[in-house]
Image: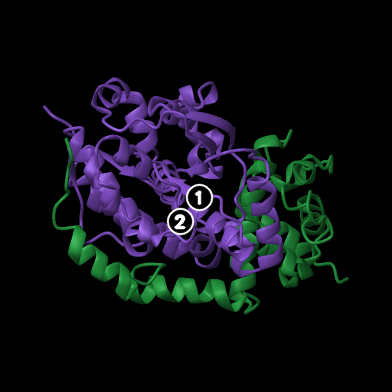
Amino acid sequence: MKETLVYFPGCLASRKFPGFDYSTRFILQKLNIEFKMSDEFSCCPDPVWVRSLSYKEWKEKGVRNLEIAKNLGSKLVTICNGCFETLFTVKKTFFNGKSIPVEHLLYTLWKNKKEEIKNKIINPLKGKRFGIHEGCHFKRPSFLTLTEFKELKEVNVLKEMVELLGAEAVGGTESCCGLPNFITDKDLSFSLARKRIDEFKNVDGIVVICPSCFSQFENVLANDKREVPIYFYFELLAYSLGLDKENIGFEFHRIKPFSI
Amino acid sequence: MKLNPFFKEEVNRELGEHKILMCYQCGKCSSFCPLFNIEPEKFNPRRIIEMVNIGAEDVLKLDDIWRCTTCYECAENCPQKINFVELIVYLRTKATEKGYAPKLPLQELESVRKEGFSVPLSPRAKKWIETYMVEVKTRG
């Protein structure tokens, strides 16, 4: 039986950067992946502030989202590290692991669709050099994630997936972008992001897999009047698979992308 | 600084017996913490654990506990496997109950309560979705 994915775009990708959501749906269709969504989903909720301010509500809403997903398909996929952290942690903590499997879509595609993507690339990104930023919660906390995604211990999935598109990938830290404390200590938050961004030298842009990291890096760069484009990985993948540039949603970027 | 042994007991009871007490103050959490490495006076995980372990309930009033980004560098590198993020979440929850939570994070919680989402849908995004989200255009 063909697997049906439950696609959970999350708040930022569906309400602030709709191009992220659009690019992802394009990718899923292009790769003939059957997927379902639900208008009943709420915020995952946010693993930093909602969890910190009202642990009970964080748990209840997370459980509710997983219960909805369970009835729609066989695996839930997210395109946000925060959504992944919440839903995966809720599943591991409150369902004794026995709920619908939860994966970050980057991992799902890396695990199952690398060859197919390679064969379907129309617009390769040859000659481009990207700094890659995985963000904290793609594989943290590792005492939870590595019990299921053992390969992540050895493999840099984002690097492989950027190189799959024909580009060069440099860096690859799993370090923090600083977004969470933007609302409690902006100076410290921005200092952290600057440190991260400055690690990348001579790049055509920085590729991220989390809308929060994207938002944080863009805000810092716009604030500092620096022009380093930030790309959400699924935008680049959609472009490589043939999505027209004008439909990617680049108009929601604060730093205009170079021509790709 | 007032010390309250019941506070220490309460934290240990909630997070698992002796979990936080296993800390031997080696400071690895702080040495790996990206915030400590930028401004050590603003955020020091080792010091927060120390305050809890001596029963310094005033830790709940510190701005410091609201600066943690929950990146897990501390927990990933703790030789005693203490989950500092779990402690921060607990301290913030207690501080919120006592009315010490800062305003902006509370606004996000309110938005999730009222709208179901942490981010408002901007008119610009709404228009874009109505224009483009109908069908996915392909080339080639």
Mark 1 falls within which chain?
A
Seen as rendered, the residue at the extreme right is B1
Q: Position of residue B41 (x, y in %)?
A: 84, 60
Asked whether disc 2 touches disc 1, contact meaning CB atoms under 8 Å apart, the reply is: yes
**What residue is shown at x 31% (from left), y 40% (from top)?**
A239
What is the chain letter for disc 2?
A
- Measured as percent of width and height from the top left, residue B64 is found at 74, 64
Residue that extends furthest to the left in the rendered view of this protein:
A1
From the viewer's side, name the closer residue of A184 and A242.
A242
Q: Which chain is green?
A: B
Identify residue type, mark 2.
Lys
Q: Position of residue A96 (x, y in %)?
A: 40, 39
Is residue B106 rendered to the left or right of residue A25?
right
For label 2, count other residues whose C-alpha is less than 10 Å away and answer few (under 14), some (14-19) or many (20+): few
Q: Residue at x 76, y 52 (%)?
A: B45
Image-based side of A189 in relation to A23, left or right? right
> Which of B56 and A175 lies nearest the eye of the viewer?
A175
Q: Inspect the image, locate mark 1, and give the three-letter code of the amino acid beneath it.
A: Pro
Q: Colour of chain A?
A: purple
Tell me the residue at 20%/56% (across/down): A38
Residue closest to the eye, A174 or A233: A233
**In 3D space, how far apart are the residues under numbered discs 2 and 1 (Cα atoms)?**
6 Å
Q: Residues within 10 Å of mark 1 (few under 14, many from 20)?
A: many
Please report the residue visible at 78 percent of the width from the left and 43 percent of the height from the top.
B23
The disc label shown at residue A256, or none:
2
Quarter of the image where one finds residue B111? bottom left
User: Would you say residue A180 is visible in this rendering?
Assistant: no
The tag on residue A229 is 1
Image height check: is B133 above or below A103? Answer: below
